Image (tube, rainbow, N blue to C red):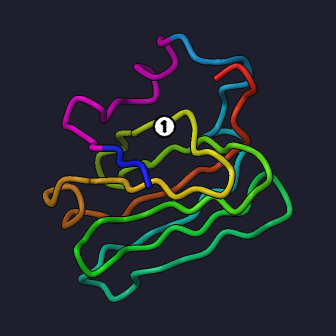
Amino acid sequence: MESVLVLQGFWKSASELSQEKHPAGYNLWKNTPKLEITNMSEGVITFKHQQNHPSKAIFEWHRLDTPILYNESEHPIQFLIQHVKTKAFVYWPRVSEGHGQRVEIPKKYQSSGPFMLYIAESPSDV
Protein backbone atom coordinates (compact mmCIF):
# COMPACT_ATOMS: atom_id res chain seq x y z
CA MET A 1 0.00 0.00 0.00
CA GLU A 2 1.34 3.42 -0.94
CA SER A 3 1.29 6.43 1.37
CA VAL A 4 0.59 10.05 0.59
CA LEU A 5 1.96 12.36 3.26
CA VAL A 6 -0.25 15.45 3.05
CA LEU A 7 2.04 18.31 4.02
CA GLN A 8 0.77 21.80 4.78
CA GLY A 9 1.84 23.02 1.33
CA PHE A 10 -0.38 20.41 -0.33
CA TRP A 11 -3.55 22.24 0.76
CA LYS A 12 -4.54 24.69 -1.98
CA SER A 13 -7.48 26.90 -2.79
CA ALA A 14 -9.71 26.20 -5.78
CA SER A 15 -8.14 29.12 -7.66
CA GLU A 16 -4.63 27.81 -6.95
CA LEU A 17 -5.58 24.36 -8.25
CA SER A 18 -7.15 25.89 -11.35
CA GLN A 19 -3.88 27.65 -12.20
CA GLU A 20 -1.84 24.45 -12.10
CA LYS A 21 -1.38 22.19 -15.10
CA HIS A 22 -3.56 19.11 -14.72
CA PRO A 23 -4.76 16.45 -17.17
CA ALA A 24 -7.64 17.28 -19.48
CA GLY A 25 -10.99 16.93 -17.76
CA TYR A 26 -9.67 18.01 -14.38
CA ASN A 27 -12.97 19.14 -12.90
CA LEU A 28 -13.44 16.90 -9.90
CA TRP A 29 -15.05 19.42 -7.60
CA LYS A 30 -17.62 20.40 -10.23
CA ASN A 31 -18.69 17.05 -11.66
CA THR A 32 -18.31 14.33 -9.06
CA PRO A 33 -20.33 13.37 -5.99
CA LYS A 34 -19.38 15.20 -2.82
CA LEU A 35 -19.22 12.97 0.21
CA GLU A 36 -18.86 14.32 3.71
CA ILE A 37 -16.43 12.79 6.19
CA THR A 38 -16.86 13.94 9.76
CA ASN A 39 -13.91 13.81 12.10
CA MET A 40 -13.38 10.86 14.40
CA SER A 41 -14.40 12.72 17.54
CA GLU A 42 -17.89 13.07 16.06
CA GLY A 43 -18.22 9.33 15.76
CA VAL A 44 -18.33 8.75 12.00
CA ILE A 45 -15.19 6.87 11.09
CA THR A 46 -16.03 5.07 7.83
CA PHE A 47 -18.03 5.71 4.72
CA LYS A 48 -18.43 4.00 1.38
CA HIS A 49 -18.91 5.40 -2.09
CA GLN A 50 -19.97 2.60 -4.42
CA GLN A 51 -22.07 4.24 -7.06
CA ASN A 52 -21.83 2.90 -10.59
CA HIS A 53 -20.11 6.07 -11.81
CA PRO A 54 -17.46 7.30 -11.66
CA SER A 55 -15.75 4.97 -9.21
CA LYS A 56 -16.06 2.37 -6.53
CA ALA A 57 -14.09 3.36 -3.49
CA ILE A 58 -14.07 2.91 0.25
CA PHE A 59 -12.61 5.61 2.47
CA GLU A 60 -11.83 4.47 6.01
CA TRP A 61 -10.50 6.15 9.14
CA HIS A 62 -8.40 3.64 11.05
CA ARG A 63 -7.64 3.52 14.75
CA LEU A 64 -4.25 5.10 14.16
CA ASP A 65 -5.98 8.13 12.63
CA THR A 66 -4.71 7.34 9.14
CA PRO A 67 -7.43 7.45 6.50
CA ILE A 68 -7.13 4.96 3.64
CA LEU A 69 -8.84 5.22 0.27
CA TYR A 70 -9.37 1.79 -1.32
CA ASN A 71 -9.95 1.72 -5.08
CA GLU A 72 -12.23 -1.19 -5.95
CA SER A 73 -12.78 -0.03 -9.53
CA GLU A 74 -11.43 -1.62 -12.68
CA HIS A 75 -9.58 1.58 -13.54
CA PRO A 76 -7.39 4.12 -11.73
CA ILE A 77 -9.11 6.89 -9.79
CA GLN A 78 -8.14 10.39 -8.72
CA PHE A 79 -9.45 12.26 -5.74
CA LEU A 80 -9.73 15.60 -4.02
CA ILE A 81 -10.20 16.10 -0.30
CA GLN A 82 -11.62 19.48 0.71
CA HIS A 83 -11.51 20.81 4.25
CA VAL A 84 -15.04 22.12 4.83
CA LYS A 85 -14.07 25.02 7.09
CA THR A 86 -10.93 26.32 5.34
CA LYS A 87 -12.17 25.37 1.82
CA ALA A 88 -8.63 24.17 1.01
CA PHE A 89 -8.13 21.17 -1.27
CA VAL A 90 -5.65 18.31 -1.53
CA TYR A 91 -5.49 16.69 -4.99
CA TRP A 92 -4.07 13.23 -5.69
CA PRO A 93 -3.94 12.21 -9.36
CA ARG A 94 -3.89 8.42 -9.26
CA VAL A 95 -4.83 5.44 -7.12
CA SER A 96 -4.36 2.26 -9.15
CA GLU A 97 -7.20 -0.22 -9.53
CA GLY A 98 -7.36 -2.75 -6.71
CA HIS A 99 -5.01 -0.74 -4.48
CA GLY A 100 -5.28 1.30 -1.33
CA GLN A 101 -3.81 4.73 -0.77
CA ARG A 102 -2.89 5.69 2.79
CA VAL A 103 -3.62 9.41 3.17
CA GLU A 104 -1.57 10.80 6.03
CA ILE A 105 -3.40 13.97 7.04
CA PRO A 106 -1.79 16.00 9.85
CA LYS A 107 -3.63 15.85 13.18
CA LYS A 108 -4.43 19.57 13.17
CA TYR A 109 -6.45 19.11 9.96
CA GLN A 110 -8.09 15.88 11.14
CA SER A 111 -9.23 17.40 14.40
CA SER A 112 -10.64 20.48 12.69
CA GLY A 113 -12.63 18.56 10.04
CA PRO A 114 -15.07 17.71 8.49
CA PHE A 115 -13.91 17.03 4.95
CA MET A 116 -15.55 16.51 1.58
CA LEU A 117 -14.22 13.77 -0.71
CA TYR A 118 -14.47 13.96 -4.50
CA ILE A 119 -13.65 10.87 -6.58
CA ALA A 120 -13.38 10.54 -10.36
CA GLU A 121 -11.83 8.26 -12.94
CA SER A 122 -8.16 9.06 -13.40
CA PRO A 123 -7.21 10.30 -16.88
CA SER A 124 -5.17 7.76 -18.83
CA ASP A 125 -2.25 10.15 -19.24
CA VAL A 126 -1.60 10.52 -15.51
Question: Which residue is at the front of the view, 65 or 99?
Answer: 99
- How many other residues sit within 10 Å of disc 1, few (<14), some (14-19) or many (≥20)? some
Number of marks in the rendered image: 1
Where the N terminus falls, by quadrant?
bottom left
Question: Which residue is at the front of the view, 35 or 21?
Answer: 21
Q: Secondary structure at mark 1?
A: strand
The residue most toward the front is 1
Side of 125 where 113 appears, left or right: left
For the record, the magenta segment spans 5-20
Above or below — where is 42 with respect to 39? below
User: Where is residue 121 drawn, in percent x and y?
Assistant: 73, 42
User: Where is residue 32 drawn, in percent x and y?
Assistant: 70, 48
Toward which corner of the image does residue 11 lie, by quadrant?
top left
Above or below — where is 6 with respect to 15? below
Question: Which residue is at the front of the view, 92 or 74?
Answer: 74
Side of 104 where 67 appears, left or right: right
Residue flagged by tag 1: what amino acid is it?
Answer: Trp
User: Where is residue 42 drawn, in percent x and y?
Assistant: 30, 84
Q: Is residue 6 magenta?
A: yes
Above or below — where is 33 with respect to 111? above
